[in-house]
Image (spheres, coloured by chain):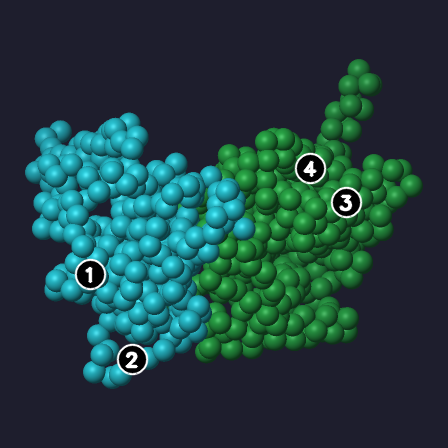
Amino acid sequence: MPISRRELLQTLGAATAFVLTGEVAWSALRQVDGQPAVAAPPAPDAAPKEQHQWAAVVDLRRCDGCKYCTQACQATHYLPKEMEWIKIYEVEDANGNRFFMPRLCMQCENAPCLKVCPVGATFKSAEGVVLVNQDRCIGCRLCMAACPYEARYFNFRQPPQPPKNFNNPMPEFPVPQRRGTVGKCVLCVHYVDEGKLPACVAACPMDALYIADLNTRVMTNRSGETYEMSRYLSENDGFRLKEELNTSPRVWYIAGHGQTIEGEHWS
Amino acid sequence: MLEHMQQADLEETAMRPIIRPGQFFWVAVASLSILVFMALVAYLQQLKEGLGVTGLSQRVSWGFYIGDMVFFIGISYGGAMTSAILRLTNAPWRAPLSRIAETMAVMSVLVGAVFPLIDMGRPERMIYLFRYGQVGSPVLWDVVAVTTYLTAGAVFLYLPLIPDIAACRDRLGPTAGRARELLYKHLALGWHGTPAQKHVLEWGTTVVAIVIIPLAVAVHSVLAFLFGVTSRPAWDSTILAPYFVVAAMFSGVATVILVTAGFRWAYHLEEYIEEKHFKYLAFIMMALGAAYGYFMFAEYLTEGYKMHQGPGSILELLLVGRLAPLMWFFGIGGIIVPILLVALPWTRNIPGITLAALAVVLAMWLKRFLIVVPGLAQPLMPTAVVVYWPSRVEVAITVGAAAAIPLLMMLFFRLFPIISIYEIEEIAAMEASRREDAAIGSVR
């Protein structure tokens, strides 16, 4: 029986899909295999073609727990008090030292929240920021259960409303938040793309927060202290949270002397 | 002559709730309807004000609703499994139970399948699950598994019902009223009990019975994956899927016992459902309870021996911490006491077995709560454990859902025979012919 053109195309399409899936699976495997043992930003040639790949660095030696970052974030995004897209934890380490640890969204390369979303409402922007399309989100909250950093927040009630002329929510600037959907730190990409600092970075009086770009490998803070990211991280023993989960976060931390975070008992 | 009388009796008993249900029926329907109505009112309030009316918080973002979903879909499984396995193993004693079990299976999965919607922040976007569905998400696996299972369950209930609907059509005729007469006529699909029809029916029922077992396993496995795919220490366990499957069967068989006891008493089915039926079901329940207890022991021993910080602190919370009273109530009241009630000959009777089943059903609901809530209350970041306390809305919706199952069953039995006339007759005929064969054999 002769094969019609349509059938042939369908077969070819299926074969291509098969090859592509195989390719994706293979690259996923390779990624796991080739995971660098030491947390370091990817080399420039491996970085995606986009102009910027946003990331962040938190210097724990400087944070004094003032929470100006949280307040600035909540004011910028019109968030209720319990929604701390950047949250300050007070941690006691194994040696009994107390210190403060800001937690923003880790913008994981391998984001568990993104994987479990049933409707594709959570996505990674071309610049590597994990965003939520609140017009799509059905509010099942599986992403909140899946996030190992507790960085996601659900709008249980009607969120505070900004002035009327402000009302143009989009994933990059989700203001106002939508009731019944999930929201999270967006690394203020709408500011960053315009060359401004994220609200939390701009508000940090201790200069503990840095915005970074993995493409140019530059990190900078409110006062304009600017470093070559990979060298700064390796010289100061930069690390990422819960490296063992293989989420590959884009937020690096620099610990103070004697501070230990990994393997701590959180309670 | 005698056989004819027996048949008339059987039809009379099976159809009594259809013809004249009695005052008790209306009282029961009214009180169950009030509970369901209160749940509806509560849900309307939640729709209006958002999920903020629940006791949920940013950390414990799942609570009663997700536990209810797992519980109600779980008990459905027990009804379908009991009926399917007994059908496939040709257990003759199943005949008077299968209708009740299958109806319970369909009604409880209907109720259970509503809970994901109730829990959703944006229920009006449900259609997005189909429009933008992501195959990588366990939520989508649940949608596919539950809808498939619901369809199979409905077919599994309907097929053996066809001859009984035909019996209603033939026996009740126009006395049943115009609407029901039409309903019976169409749903009976022209059944006249010809050998060819019987052959097709038997074949079809067997196929569905075979299909429904792996389907039910699949449904409960993917429900477990909803939790198992996260990095939460309490749920990060490879045993979760089989654990959920056994839990579903255990609670399901207990529910079958419970509803059977209820309908037997209320609908006077003592002649057909005897103590032996309860004993057989109780043995199945006991075996499943032992299996579930074993799974739990295996999980807790290996975790407790190492006491790694994540699972270890959950274990502490459950066994000696704030939730210990609930956990021990579950272990003793939900597993040990029911097993003893069935194992000891003095309590192995209808009241004892019904009591055991009631304990299992309540305890298994509690166990679902103990799986969902501590798994979320346990912090992943350096903060304290968060306490979850359900709101009145959540309690009202849960109670209403529990009431909806017997209500739906009663309304169903208002239309269709509560015990399978056809199956009882078929099995009686089979046994009669077997006796005849044996008699002929002995003469030779």
3D distance between C-alphas at marks 4 and 3:
10 Å
Say which element carries label 3.
helix
The answer to whether dots 4 and 2 both sit on one chain is no
Say which element carries label 2.
loop
Q: Residue at x 26, y 83 (%)?
A: A163
Q: Residue A225, located in which quarter of the rendered image?
A: bottom left
Task: Give whichever of A225, B245 is nearer the camera.
Answer: A225
On the image, numbered disc 3 is attached to which residue? Answer: B332
The answer to whether dots 4 and 1 both sit on one chain is no
The residue positioned farthest toward the front in the image shown = A257
Q: Which chain is cyan?
A: A
Q: Amino acid at mark 4?
A: Gly
The picture places residue B45, in percent across and down from the top left corner, at 51, 77
**Observer able to see residue A254:** yes
On the image, numbered disc 1 is attached to which residue? Answer: A223
Q: Badge 2: few (under 14), some or many (20 or more) residues near its Cα, within 10 Å? A: some
